Image: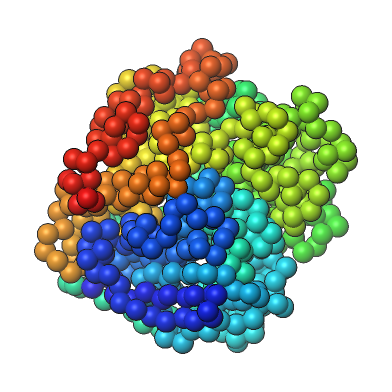
Amino acid sequence: MGWQKKILRVNLTAGTAASEPLNMEWAHEYLGERGLATKYLYEEMDPTADPMGPDNILIFATGPLTGTMASTSGRYAVVTKGPLTHAIACSNSGGKFGAELKYAGYDLMIVEGRSPEPVYLHIVDDEVEILPAEEIWGTTVWHTEEHLKAKHQNPLLKVASIGVAGESGVRYACIVNDLHRAAGRSGVGAVMGSKNLKAVAVHGTRGVTVKDPKAFMQAVRETHAMLADNSGRKGLTELGTNDMIDSMQEFGGLPTENFHKVQFDGVGKINPGAMQATGPEGHRNLITNKACFGCTIACGRIAHINKTHFTIVNRPEYRHASGGLEYETAYAFGPLLCIDDIDALTYAAFVSNEHGYDPISFGGTLAAAMELYEMGVIGKDDTDGVELKFGNAEALTIMAEKTGKYEGFGKILGLGSKLMCEKYGHPEIAMHVKGQEFAGYDSRALQGMGLGFVTSNRGACHLKHDVFAEDMEDQTGKGKAKPCKDSQDKIAMIDSTGLCLFTTCAWDVPEFRRQIAAACEGDDWTEERLIEIGERVWNVERMYNLKAGLTAADDTLPQRLLEDPAPSGTAKGKVSDLPQMLPEYYEYRGWTSDGEPTTQTLQRLGLK
């Protein structure tokens, strides 16, 4: 109930695909999606394996509430060892693909090995085919989805695929579904490419059953109503996530010029107001908003580019509507690079979706390259004749294309900031944790966010913890360790349900508990049990990373954030308080001073 109780195991080396029963003991201990996939990865794969080798495992995972009537029930996760970080990667996506995989009858799809030739998976319920992909290898995500729907004469197919970035091993390549939703971080698309797997096209005709339909629908009605009346939900619907850019600008937490600054003078040209404004030619960047499967929030943006803009004046193929600016994309292409051209940002966003790579890591890597260029470490001979200066909108659009197509200096940018800066002898320029570039929050202004960045198991990530309220109230590290740890456990649980984190604008643990208790078999779905599931997931991820070779030394911030004071904003003059926060965090976690779970912690969570 809730679960389909079945997984699909695909071995690309052997060319086989077969279903098998879901381990229900693990399902009750890890719930689904992020948690359950983490357990399978931990038990079935050597964490020291090469992330781009055939021994890495790629898991597509749904949750017990994926595909149900619950709001935001379209989520799925891709869990693997990430080539960007060499740590566990858990990348979450919305759209419609996750629900369709669930409707085909699968809680998880585990992809093993490597195909000798490019292939794609075609799944219609129990019928699973591994088919040649030569005719779509080397093409874009957009072309692949259109082609597979036409080839199989099935417009209901939901497609998750990679572009040339994933095929070529760009370390932060992503898996794109529904044209512009993505399992976006840590390089899960590069893992898919390393397996010669171009796409997964799925159509499911089976529903999802729940334990107590009457109780479940009652819980759904009430939680839908809570979202409908919530001001946070209304803000996401009306303004999208990019509303955060104004908040961070005012607060002084908006990383600018590769974190040399914390505020950006051009923010008014790329914020939600600019997206919604009608220009002198009658052009409006934002067309409408859009929702994922089952979503009653609809935070997605659909936008188009001014037809007179230099990026598309001779490119009619981009004169259409597609996924518009989210906050992280706007930050990474805008303030981080000192660019205030909204059409250039939108074009680069289109390109990152079309070719399949993470805009956050790309923006962070390009920012580091721009700093190297202005330092004189690299020049035009290195950058294909492009002047990589901060504020150069044309440089952004050119490098977005080159990276997506894996051409010229785009191959260097495809390494990610850590490896690129090491290559040029300046590792201090790369702004990352564990090899993954930062989301749009400066750790000197948001101290709890900084602690969450360094302790995140997948590298710098803003979506695995929530200390935002505490950070707004106090710009020091005092009292941030416990809420950081507690929110990490709660979010690990939410990520395992199949629902979206944005529901927490209106819901807390009781709302998730009610829906899980009505949907899933068993009578002991307490709030305490759900939080313990989240804590168990977090600790298994940590254990995986420790076995992969990461240590407490990887739980750190770049020198710039630890030593260079914030130049303006509410945290002016401050540096990160990480040295004080981290030992306290380890203690709350029940870990040693070396960041390893103690025997007592493992025993309490049933992990030893």
- Closer-to-camera residue (478/604): 604
- Closer-to-camera residue (125/39): 39
Against 602, residue 3 (above or below) is below
Q: Residue furthest top?
A: 573
Q: Position of residue 475 (x, y in %)?
A: 40, 20
- Closer-to-camera residue (391/131): 131
Q: Quadrant of the N terminus?
A: bottom left
The reply to whether residue 323 is in sight is no
Q: Residue at x 57, y 60 (%)?
A: 53
Q: Residue at x 79, y 41 (%)?
A: 395
Give the left or right position of residue 146, taking residue 54 as reference. right
Give the left or right position of residue 232, taking residue 97 as reference. left
The reply to whether residue 10 is in sight is yes
Q: Position of residue 32 (x, y in %)?
A: 32, 62
How many numbered marks, from 0 up? 0
Q: Position of residue 410 (x, y in %)?
A: 75, 48
Q: Residue at x 46, y 87 (%)?
A: 127
User: Colour scheme used in the picture?
Assistant: rainbow
Q: Residue at x 18, y 40 (%)?
A: 600
- Closer-to-camera residue (161/204): 161
Against 532, residue 107 (above or below) is below
Against 85, residue 179 (above or below) is below
Q: Position of residue 144 (x, y in %)?
A: 65, 72
Q: Choose top left, top right, bottom left or bottom right for residue 550.
A: top left
Give the left or right position of residue 23, taking residue 182 as reference. left
